Image: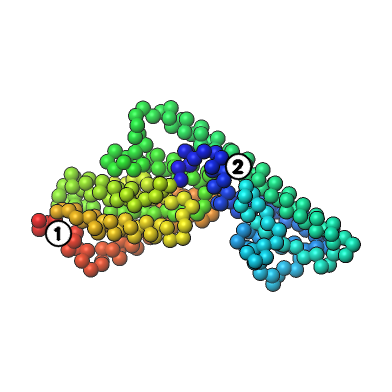
Amino acid sequence: MDYKAVPFEQRIKENIRSYEMNNLYALDTLTEYCKSLCAVTDATVLLTERHGEKIISVGGFAGFRPDVVGDPGRKVRVYGRTIAHLYADTQKVSPEKREAVEKMLDGFANMLSRWGEETYLHTETAVYADELEQKLNVQHVQTAKGENEDVLTGVYHKLYFEERMKVIDRAEVAPVAVINVNINDWKFVNDHFGDEESDRLIKTVAGILKQEKKPDYIIGRVDGDVFIVLIPMADDGEAESYCDRVKQACLAFEDKILAPSVACGIVYKTNVEEKLEDKLDDAEYEMFNNKFEVKNAPGYRERLEHGLHS
């Protein structure tokens, strides 16, 4: 997703998917409120994340396993998306007070929804304003179309790619797949066929990365033969599938000299408090593990050296 191009109304609808309770509420304060509520009403309460992970429990919920599908309790919804579930046990509440306590719990769930929406809107507005300011600053210094692109490949150059990572971090997007893509034996091509062919190899791999990507993927060339691909809000298996497509496209490439091949390392930013920059070393480590497998696969060396015999 291009976070600088998405209209504010659209991002408000979409970005809520990456928010959890700790992004919207002061959990310490909320816990104290729940304790006070239970002390006054004799009820017990449990708050869970949207998928059922327990966040705040006051009372006898030790053995309770939330079923957010079959028994969702009171849903806390922010901009049309469930952000939490409120469960309550009022069995110890006196019968004459039970109806009033149930209404109080309904009001508590509604209050959480309104509180969450206010916090969410404030956060997204601040991020959006910051991005607009940055975009205006970038446009101010730009003198030609394509200034953000690497001249050889057409993907983002390193400096601009690093700015895009910071924008995603500030928007608190998670999960984000981080993929290190390294060209195998680029130096072999450079040593045997020269700069022109080694540059053509880099362009060929960049073309495959762009060909197999989806519109919201972000690709940067961060070193001579190294690319980083970001997939915001990646689905399960999406990054792995992308790498498989890229590798298959490399194998299918027919040329008298070039035999493109890549190694890929995939890691994930799963917490909005993490920084994408801190994930780059981990992705590089996974890439080297993959490189060892790829370069030791049967037939790899023969394919790499076929240009020497043409």
Q: Is residue 310 left or right of residue 179?
A: left
Residue 13 left/right relative to 188: right
Which element is circle 1 on?
helix
Q: Which mark is residue 306?
A: 1
- The image quadrant that residue 48 belongs to is bottom right
Q: Tag 2: residue type?
A: Thr
**In this view, 232 is above or below 134:** below
Residue 303 image point, x, y percent: 18, 61
Label ID, residue 31:
none
In primary-sequence order, the first of circles 2 and 1 is: 2
Q: Position of residue 289 (x, y in %)?
A: 34, 63
Quarter-of-image position of residue 154: top left
| Secondary structure under the numbered disc 2 in the rendered image | helix
Q: Residue furthest bottom?
A: 63
Residue at 25 percent of width and 66 percent of height = 296
C-alpha gap between disc 2 and disc 1:
56 Å
Where residue 22 sits in the image (x, y, percent)? 63, 53
Neighbor class of circle 1 (other Cα within 10 Å; few <14, some 14-19, many 20+) is some
Residue shown at 43% from the left, 27% from the top: 140
Left or right placement of residue 186 versus residue 243 in this view: left
Q: Residue furthest left?
A: 310
- Residue 126 visible in the current orientation: yes
Count residues near mark 2 (Cα–Cα under 10 Å), then give few for <14, some for 14-19, many for 20+: some
Residue placed under numbered mark 2 in the picture: 123
Q: Amino acid at mark 1?
A: His
How far from the left and from the top, in percent, is residue 176? 47, 53
